[in-house]
């Protein structure tokens, strides 16, 4: 279905730490970023995003039955009161904050590195519950703007990290369906996906002229989010289109990993067991420690300038009194009582929290610049996303790459770059002329040679002709597989995953085995399109694969 079949495009950036949505009418596409969220009336401020946080009512002993009390900003824990400082037990608390659940979609995290979730609470429930809370707000906003509009008249564009594996997209698609955004689990014409760096690249297209970047030039976008940092290098084509030059890359080195280094710092001061108990039994205060102390007082303003830095005191008794009860080591208790439960945070301490994360980002940029596909010098690096507002990160990137890339900049409103770019994608998908494949694909008969790293257009098919094995065969099932490995020959090799299947009918058995079927795959979109055409009857079957982890279902349309 084309854009003319929809009235409105809505982009949803479901992020690790913050989420938001933007929208535009298809005829007069002025992009509006939603900036008024539940609970923000207390602050009298507007914000393009709200916190990706839930607060559950845990009255039931079964986490599957938990209901959401609050979501977004109101779900954040409040400052501990004098009463909670005296009574630190959480046994009667029914309001449990849950956050960072999106990171559970990453398959390269060890069990230790995965963010805390209460025992028995599945991350897919948290994702679904969060999206289900956002849905009525989107409906309300759209109905006020365009009375009578239905979700079937809306093209939804969800953004995803660059490094997500194929089946992860299917998990998210399930959550989107369960949250009520789509009528079917798969083959939804009103649901599209784009990667976060691709959306950011579309947004930065509007900034190229002011930096004198001309047609034929290449530029890199580094989307620095809360959980992931994603990169893409694009070439500006005539007619304001973009081609992808190198494989998009990313890693888990967003701003929340600076928070994690802060927790490691406290573990060294107070003991690993103390911090584990504090996180497990007093998550509200644990969350308050990060969101209301560390982020505003330490992380956000860090410039990396030793001379301007002033040491910061963390008052444990005031900020997170429950933590005092979690410290069991007598030696540590004696030391902390002598310091009146104050922990001094120095410049070197903060530097030690930032540098492990920033160094990973610099490595990602360095690898992109050194890619063999980078046939010409990179004209500019655009830093976008919430973490791009970190003065220290921007300083390090400029210091490291300023001699080889002439323009390194943070565009206006970097936190909404992905949202705005995703709306632009929904309005005109053809703006993305080509993508570079990050996987190798094939069926049980053969694998496409050197697919990974190949630049393909959205309408470029990879086709083959196949025949039934038996004269009386009435169907053919094409199983499709994917792997990041190169030089793959067989579909049962280690590291290969089935991503979908397409069954076609062959009723004309009178022709025996002489019934050719043309099978095609098109990779130009994140959801791969498979098409099979019975050359005798000209009947065409098509499907978009949703990459289900357990291969439990695949739908096709004729």
Image (cartoon, rainbow, N blue to C red):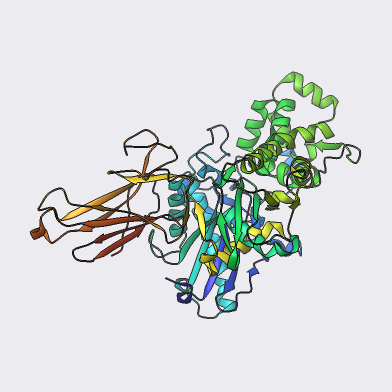
The answer to whether residue 346 shows anywhere in this view is: no
Q: Image quadrant for the C terminus?
A: bottom left
Residue extending farthest to the right is 307
At a point 66% along the width and 26% down the height, the residue shown is: 272
Give residue 439's position: percent from left, percent from top: 45, 44
Residue 456 image offset from top left, x and y in percent: 46, 54
Q: Is residue 7 left or right of residue 441?
A: right
Above or below 431: residue 350: above
- In this rendering, would 189 be left or right of 335? left
Could you say which is closer to the camera, residue 469 or residue 188?
Answer: 469
Give the farthest residue toward the top.
Answer: 331
Q: Is residue 544 visible?
A: yes
Viewer-proximal residue, 84 or 443?
Answer: 443
Q: Is residue 175 above or below residue 227?
A: below
Residue at screen point 74% across, 39% down: 320
At x 68% / y 66%, what residue is drawn?
36
Q: Position of residue 21 (x, y in %)?
A: 60, 63
Residue closest to the eye, 315 or 144: 144
- Point out residue 255 in the picture as x, y percentages from the top left corner: 68, 44
Quadrant occupied by the N terminus: bottom left
Relative depth, front residue between 292 and 338: 292
Residue 262, quarter of picture:
top right
Residue 446: name its quadrant.
Answer: top left
Q: Residue furthest bottom?
A: 147
Q: Quadrant of residue 346?
A: top right
User: Disc count in the image?
Assistant: 0
């Amino acid at each position: 279905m084309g854009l003319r079949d929809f009235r409105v495009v809505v982009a949803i950036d479901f992020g690790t730490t913050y989420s938001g949505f933007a929208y535009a009418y298809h005829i007069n596409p002025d992009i509006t970023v939603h900036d008024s969220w539940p609970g923000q009336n207390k602050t009298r401020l507007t914000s393009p995003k709200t916190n990706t946080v839930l607060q559950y009512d845990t009255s039931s002993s079964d986490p599957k039955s938990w209901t959401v009390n609050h979501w977004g900003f109101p779900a954040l824990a409040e400052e501990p009161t004098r009463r909670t400082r005296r009574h630190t037990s959480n046994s009667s608390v029914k309001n449990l904050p849950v956050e960072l659940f999106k990171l559970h979609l990453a398959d390269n995290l060890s069990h230790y590195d995965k963010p805390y979730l209460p025992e028995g609470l599945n991350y897919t429930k948290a994702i679904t519950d969060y999206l289900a809370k956002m849905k009525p707000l989107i409906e309300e906003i759209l109905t006020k703007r365009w009375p009578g509009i239905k979700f079937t008249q809306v093209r939804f564009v969800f953004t995803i990290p660059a490094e997500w594996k194929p089946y992860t997209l299917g998990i998210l698609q399930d959550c989107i369906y369960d949250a009520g955004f789509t009528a079917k689990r798969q083959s939804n014409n009103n649901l599209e996906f784009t990667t976060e760096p691709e959306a950011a690249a579309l947004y930065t297209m509007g900034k190229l002229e002011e930096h004198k970047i001309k047609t034929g030039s290449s530029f890199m976008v580094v989307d620095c989010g809360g959980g992931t940092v994603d990169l893409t290098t694009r070439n500006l084509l005539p007619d304001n289109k973009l081609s992808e030059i190198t494989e998009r890359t990313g890693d888990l080195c967003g701003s929340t990993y600076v928070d994690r280094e802060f927790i490691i710092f406290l573990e060294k001061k107070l003991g690993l067991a103390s911090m584990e108990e504090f996180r497990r039994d007093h998550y509200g205060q644990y969350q308050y420690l990060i969101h209301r102390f560390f982020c505003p007082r330490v992380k956000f303003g860090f410039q990396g300038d030793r001379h301007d830095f002033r040491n910061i005191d963390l008052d444990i008794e005031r900020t997170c009194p429950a933590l005092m009860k979690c410290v069991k080591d007598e030696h540590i208790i004696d030391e902390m009582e002598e310091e009146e439960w104050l922990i001094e945070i120095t410049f070197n301490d903060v530097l030690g929290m930032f540098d492990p994360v920033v160094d990973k980002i610099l490595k990602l940029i360095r690898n992109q610049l050194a890619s063999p596909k980078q046939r010409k010098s990179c004209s500019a690096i655009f830093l976008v996303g919430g973490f791009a507002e970190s003065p220290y990160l921007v300083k390090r990137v400029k210091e490291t790459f300023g001699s080889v890339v002439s323009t390194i900049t943070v565009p206006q409103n970097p936190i909404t770059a992905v949202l705005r770019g995703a709306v632009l994608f929904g309005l005109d998908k053809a703006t993305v002329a080509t993508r570079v494949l990050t996987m190798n694909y094939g069926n049980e008969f053969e694998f496409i040679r050197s697919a990974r790293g190949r630049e393909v257009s959205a309408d470029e098919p990879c086709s083959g002709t196949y025949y039934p094995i038996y004269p009386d065969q009435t169907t053919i099932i094409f199983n499709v597989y994917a792997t990041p490995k190169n030089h793959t020959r067989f579909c049962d090799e280690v590291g290969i995953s089935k991503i979908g299947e397409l069954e076609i009918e062959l009723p004309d058995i009178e022709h025996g085995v002489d019934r050719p079927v043309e099978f095609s795959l098109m990779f130009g979109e994140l959801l791969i399109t498979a098409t099979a055409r019975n050359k005798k009857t000209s009947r065409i079957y098509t499907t978009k694969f949703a990459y289900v982890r357990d291969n439990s279902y695949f739908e096709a349309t004729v």
